[in-house]
Amino acid sequence: MTNPGRFLPLVFLVAVSSHSPKASFAQAAGEDGVKASIHTFSQVYGAIESNFADAVDPDTAVYRGAIPGMLRTLDPHSAFYDPKSWQLMREGQSGHYYGVGMLIGAPRGNEVLVMHPFEGSPAFKAGIHPGDQIIEVNDTKITKPDTSIVSGLLKGPRGTTAVIKVRRVGKPDPLTFTVVRDIVPRDSVNYAFWIEPGIAYMKIEAFNETTGHEVDKALAKFDESQIKGLILDLRNNPGGLVNEAVNVADRFLHKGQAIVSHHGRASSETKFVARKGERGPEYPMVVLVNRGTASAAEILSGALQDHDRAVILGENTFGKGLVQAPFPVTGNGALMLTIAKYYTPSGRLIQRDYEHTSLIDYYSRTEGHNNEKDMKKTDGGRTVFGGDGIAPDQRYFDPKLDDLERQLRSVFFFYSPEYFAKHPAPMDKSWQPDAATMEDFKAYASQHKVQFTAEQWNKDSAWISERLREELFITAFSKEQSDRLVLENDPEVRRGVEALPSSKALLDKARETLAKQAQAGEPLNR
């Protein structure tokens, strides 16, 4: 569960194949038709450039207009990346970047604020706080709420200096921080801890170049021999590198079991199977998913479900069964083109329909329908369907926020600097909002046009107190420690623990199936 007192992140849904596409731009069918279309485009562009009322920027017309427009006729996930956005994409996949280490945003639209520094980063060590308004970086004044410009100013080579000037609530004068840029790890496994004795919890936030290694490291730290059950959290995991999802699946499946396959018009079928398998004890697993679970995260979920290796708990996943591969283009940009569809071990295509819906509805993840024609069986004989993501074995939906809770979601963030301006003393981890703090927050919410009755406030007071504690812990300790507090109290995680006996039953049946297949000499890589 994401912290409901914070802003929802923008999620990019991308799966990248490690196999270079065999087709090239020059290998196009129907060259006469292509030439005629290009000639028509040139005529139209020439007329625009010569006669449009204002001067035409070629980059805007082609890179932001013509190319995206063409790609939108194909599918929702083919995309063109200019050099800057392609660099950001590669940084995200690498699992690190060089800079000061903080998330920035413009939640009010008129200023750039620090949302939070990353624990252990240069910005964190320097003492920069959530809610600080960035007004200057290295003598460049921030006059527009453009986070991309500010982000570019903050990044830089390792060892170089960023002088950051901020305004902080409660401080009459700006504060200046001299921060030495360093490598900023963006690990994909930041949360791995015992949720209770014998029950391990691990969250994979994305699949980048280091995910498989991070999972191995986290499990080794637990000492797998002590694990009696694992809660694997893939909620809001947007995907990433297919190979890393395969590496993680390999760890939990038997050698030779299928993980995923994909093929397309110009790419032959590629099958991924567990090459090592059985690396560690075979304990029950529950995988947490939601509508933000996509792409490579669905590959992992589908493989574990089809082989009855884990119970899938939550709601239908996003439903992205398309694989993209990069085609470099002139100027250090890249075309991410859908080259194939992928299929779970049972043969399911879990891609949702995008041809009969708007792009807005597609990305807002309105509920679709299972494809009754794509009915398959798991190893243990359970029925599963394609067509609408991975359907969970056990359903769980986050409770819907009521009117007051919705109004307060962003208010917690803006109240936090106000609180610490009045309470500079260090906070203890046992801290809970007292009556005075709740009254102060209530007054702050009223001043900021949150409308509620006494009855509504009393009804939601426990929820408000917990969200307030989580928000203030971000400044007092770190975003990561606050998130751990959220996860430890997450009702869906607790539901996952309760589902472990069901997972054990699946696991026992899967063992019987594997034993029968071995006796019959049947291959595992279906």
Image: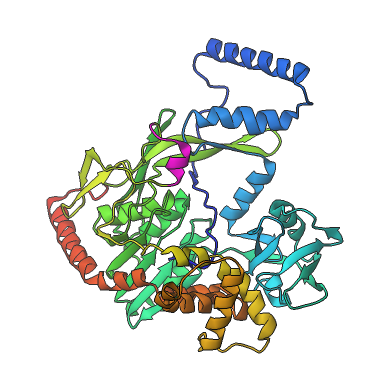
Is residue 393 in view from this perspective?
A: yes
Q: How is the image coloured?
A: rainbow
For the N terminus, give its image quadrant: bottom left
In this rendering, the answer to whether 457 lies above or below 359 is below
The C terminus, quarter of image: top left
Which span of residues is magenta-colored? 356-364
Q: Nearer the viewer, residue 508 or 522?
A: 508
Residue 348, percent from left and from top: 28, 42
Residue 476 versus residue 304: which sits nearer the camera? 476
Give the left or right position of residue 358, taking residue 285 as reference: right
Q: Above or below — where is 305 with respect to 189?
A: above
* Residue 347, picture quadrant: top left
Relative depth, front residue between 465 and 501: 465
Residue at the image position 78 percent from the left and 66 percent from the top: 159
Can residue 489 be seen from the camera position used here? no
Residue 50 found in image quarter? top right
The verdict on residue 362 being magenta is: yes
Number of numbered markers: 0
Question: In this view, which residue lies farthest toward the right?
Answer: 139
Q: Is residue 497 left or right of residue 167?
A: left
Say whether residue 264 is left or right of residue 329: left
Residue 38 lies in the magenta stretch: no
- The residue shown at (59%, 54%) is 92
Residue 345 placement (x, y as % from top left): 29, 47
Q: Position of residue 19 (x, y in %)?
A: 49, 41
Q: Is residue 48 left or right of residue 492?
A: right
Task: Report x, y in % for residue 133.
Answer: 73, 66
Q: Pick whichever, 242 or 438, lies toward us.
A: 438
> Vertically, is 63 above or below 489?
above
